[in-house]
Image (cartoon, grey):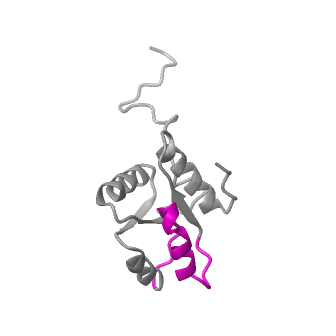
Amino acid sequence: MLGVDQRRRADRRFYRRGGRRPEDVSGFSPLVMVVEADRARRTLTERILASSHFAVAPVASIESALAICRGLAPSVIVCNERDEPRVRAGLEPRDIPIVGTNVGPDALERLVDRIRDAVRGQPAPAG
């Protein structure tokens, strides 16, 4: 048909995309460190962020994360909300945005938006 765009793949214009933007440098993806002791949650969070075009560094413990942060500078650290004060205290002169994860029906959908806001340097919305 004339005037109809024939696509080989599904139309992805309406899917959430987190990492890369047209104005970003080629190959740039924000590095998100995921600190989670629960392996299943860590893997799920890693897959969701990777599918949204974030570079992900999964870590199993806070101590390991703080040791890694001495030589690596992630754009954002994602951790459990109860662990957030310990992570922030361990990073102390450095100011790396920390996004706390929570449990809820739309928690994972909102997580990508909160990480995107942290990468852009915007304050996270309350709630």
Relative to residue 112, is residue 60 drawn left or right? left
Q: Residue furthest front?
A: 82
What residue appears at the point 52 percent right and 75 percent down from the top-left corner? 86
Residue 118 x/y as whole percent: 61, 61
Residue 56 x/y as whole percent: 41, 63
Residue 52 x/y as whole percent: 45, 50
Q: Is residue 28 visible?
A: no
Q: Is residue 52 visible?
A: yes
The quarter in which the N terminus is drawn is top left
What residue appears at the point 49 percent right and 43 percent down from the top-left corner? 104
Is 59 or 11 nearer to us in this picture?
Answer: 59
What residue appears at the point 57 percent right and 59 percent down from the top-left corner? 24
Is 80 or 3 nearer to us in this picture?
Answer: 80
Residue 123 placement: quadrant: bottom right
* Total tally of numbered discs in the picture: 0
Is 36 or 112 nearer to us in this picture?
Answer: 36
Q: Residue furthest left?
A: 39
What residue appears at the point 42 percent right and 75 percent down from the top-left corner? 62
Query: Is 93 above or below relative to 55?
Result: below
Residue 6 x/y as whole percent: 42, 25
Query: Is 22 above or below relative to 55?
Result: above
Q: Magenta includes 82? A: yes
Relative to residue 39, is residue 55 drawn left or right? right
Q: Magenta includes 60? A: no
Relative to residue 114, is residue 5 drawn left or right? left
Is 32 or 15 nearer to us in this picture?
Answer: 32
**Residues rendered magenta in the picture:** 71-96
Residue 121 placement: quadrant: bottom right
